[in-house]
Image (cartoon, rainbow, N blue to C red):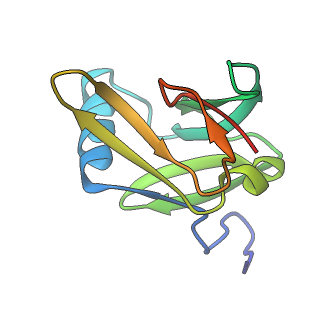
Amino acid sequence: MIATKDTVTTQPITLTDHAVRELTRIMNQQNISEEYGLRVGVKGGGCSGFSYVLGFDAPKDNDDSFEINGIKVFMQKSHAIYLLGMEIDWVEGLNNRGFSFNNPNASSSCGCGSSFSA
């Protein structure tokens, strides 16, 4: 990973085109400030041990920051071990609508896909 003053150039996650379109729509609809970016992370809890964090937030001191397909992304440095290589997608179907997480680091995940164990 190559680090510069404010940005790490290697992207730990990917955002699909569908996810970028939906995130852009949400940002425009909710008038998200340009200083904010997409916070991606994990927290303890959920039926499998960890839950994903996904929302708009201002950068914090312990964050790495990335630009992925035009979206600013913030992630706590300590969360990278759980999220490296993850793909975030937007799914819109008859039985499921929302962001989905394809995480190669998850040893198991719950049926709804919003929590995992590593």
Q: Residue furthest left?
A: 94
Residue placed most toward the observer, 109 or 61:
109
The residue sitting at 50% across, 25% down in the picture is: 111
Q: Position of residue 47 (x, y in %)?
A: 68, 19
Q: Quadrant of residue 5?
A: bottom right
Residue 91 position within the rendered picture, expressed as x and y whole percent measured from the top left: 27, 36
Residue at screen point 15% across, 23% down:
94
Image-based side of 75 in relation to 20, left or right:
right
Quadrant location of the C terminus in the rendered image: top right
Residue 113 pos. (x, y %): 50, 31
| Residue found 33% across the figure and 25% down from its top | 31
Q: How many marks?
A: 0
Q: Going by the image, does 92 lie left or right of 101?
A: left
Q: Quadrant of the N terminus?
A: bottom right
Outermost residue to the bottom: 2
**Residue at the location (70% across, 27% down)?**
48
**Left or right: residue 95 compared with residue 113:** left
Left or right position of 33 against 24: right
93 is higher (above) or lower (below) than 39: above
Q: Is residue 59 above or below residue 27?
A: below
Task: From this view, report whether residue 87 is shown above or below residue 114.
Answer: below
